Each structure stands twice: as structure tokens, then as C-alpha cells.
Image (cartoon, rainbow, N blue to C red):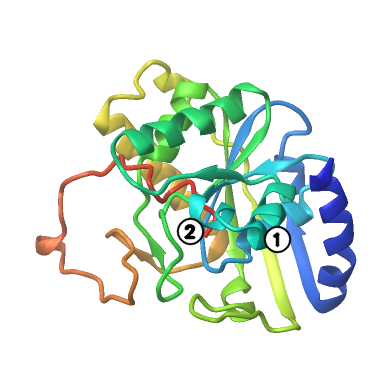
Amino acid sequence: MMYWVLKGILKPPLLAAYRIKSEGLENVPRRGAAIIAANHLSFLDSFFIPLVVKRRKVTYLAKADYFKTWKTSWFFKAAGQISCEREGGSKSEQSLNIALDVLKSGNLLGIYPEGTRSPDGRLYRGRTGVARLALAAGVPVIPTGLVGTDKIQPKDAKFPKLSGEIKVRFGKPLDFTRYQGREHDRFVLRSVTDEILYEIMQLSGQVYVDEYASKKPTQPLPESHRPLVDDIDLSEEVLAG
């Protein structure tokens, strides 16, 4: 209930301040579970995507730090976000199970496959947790491209600008049921994740970097120096911030 109240309060001023254009809304299912997998440019991404999705709640798993004080806890709870620890290991499995519960309840789950906000506006290699969730829950993935949110509020900015243009582009649902039962196969997970990231790249128009995003801007590594190891850690990739 509080989700819709908060959305009703925030929608008019956000629409008044920003020129928000959405494309492909028909690709977001009107009912049933699905994963909205998007690029991550700004803290505001988790607000603009739910803003344009009509009549459906989008749930994100947010880092537990946001829930430690009442000043921020009430807001994130009202926004429909669920507290989640960032640490790896068993905490990552807990994140996976919470996300699966959201999907098994027939809801929309928002996720950022890169695992963190882009440090420089480019699109980085996706972590395979999004693939694990899609295969384990047997749900479609809606690739989503955000454009312009980093201009509204860059990564290190404390406050957003009060004007600007934003585009939210939803691609056609990706069906991975052909891999049912193979959510622990690393090669399948890598393939599924790369397919999702390719579609996000097409929608966002970003330059792709085949390495995991770091906290600071980086230069692409030469092909011969890129790591071959994979990472299924869910500690950041389902988080809003």
C-alpha cells in the first residue's frame, strides 16, 4: 500500500522536473513474474524504472545500510525495497533466496547485472546471478536500457539536478526455458548473462567493456590480459545502490 502512496506522491514532481520518455512498455508483462535487468548509471535508476512501469510493483533488493536508521529505512520500505546484506558466501545465497521468493510470488524483480553503478558511463561485464535467478525461477528477462540518468545524478553527486531528459527502453522478453535445470552450469550461466548484456547494450547505446566494473573509472584491458574466471557472487548485483 505504501508503495503506491509514495509513487503517487513522487510521480507529479518527477514528471514536472524531468522529460521522461519510455519505450517498449508493452514488453513488460501485465501479470506474472519477470526480471527487469537494466544497466546501472545512477542511484535514481531504481526510481525511474518503477515510475514508468504502470500498475505493477517493481521490487529491488537494497543494501542493508539503508535500513539501519529510521531516516532512510521508512523510505526504502515504502518504495518496496527489501533489506539485503552485501557480504558474499552465505549472505549471497540469502540474497538469491529472497529474490527467488519475489519471483515465485509472481512479482517483478529489478536487477542490475553489472553488480554496481558504472564508474564511467560504459556498460560492464554482467555477473551471472541474473542468469541463475532466471533459470531457477523459470521466468523471462526484460532487458532494459536507461539513458541520461547519469547526467541527472552522477555517481558521486549527493543531490540530483532538477532538470534533464531520461529515456527508459524495455526490450522484448528473453526466454531461457531451453536451459531449464541447468542453473548451476557455469557455461550456460555465462552464455545467458552475455545474451542479456548484449540486449541491454543495444537498448542503452553504451560502449561495452568485457571486464567487471570497479569503483573507479578504468581503461579496457587488452584481450590477452582479461580474466577467464567467472563470478556468481550475488553480494552487489541485485542491489539498488
Residue annotated with mark 1:
48
Please indicate whether residue 3 sits to the left or right of residue 62 in the image.
right
In front of the other: 133 or 69: 69
- Image vertical order of residue 45 relative to residue 90, above or below: below
Q: Residue 209's x, y, as percent?
A: 32, 64
Q: Which residue is mark 2?
A: 201
Which quadrant of the view contains residue 51?
Answer: bottom right
Quarter of the image where the N terminus is located? top right
Residue plotted at (76% across, 28% down): 31
User: Residue at (33%, 75%) from the top-left corner?
Assistant: 216
Identified by mark 1, the residue type is Phe
Check the image and report above or below for 46 versus 165: above
- Residue in front for this viewpoint, 74 or 211: 74
**Name of the residue lying farthest toward the top:** 181
Q: Tell whether 79 sits left or right of 101.
A: right
Could you say whether the residue bearing mark 1 is in a helix, strand or loop? Answer: helix
Task: Please report whichever mark, 1 or 2, sits nearer to the chain's N-terminal start.
Answer: 1
**CA separation in Å, label 1 and label 2:** 19 Å
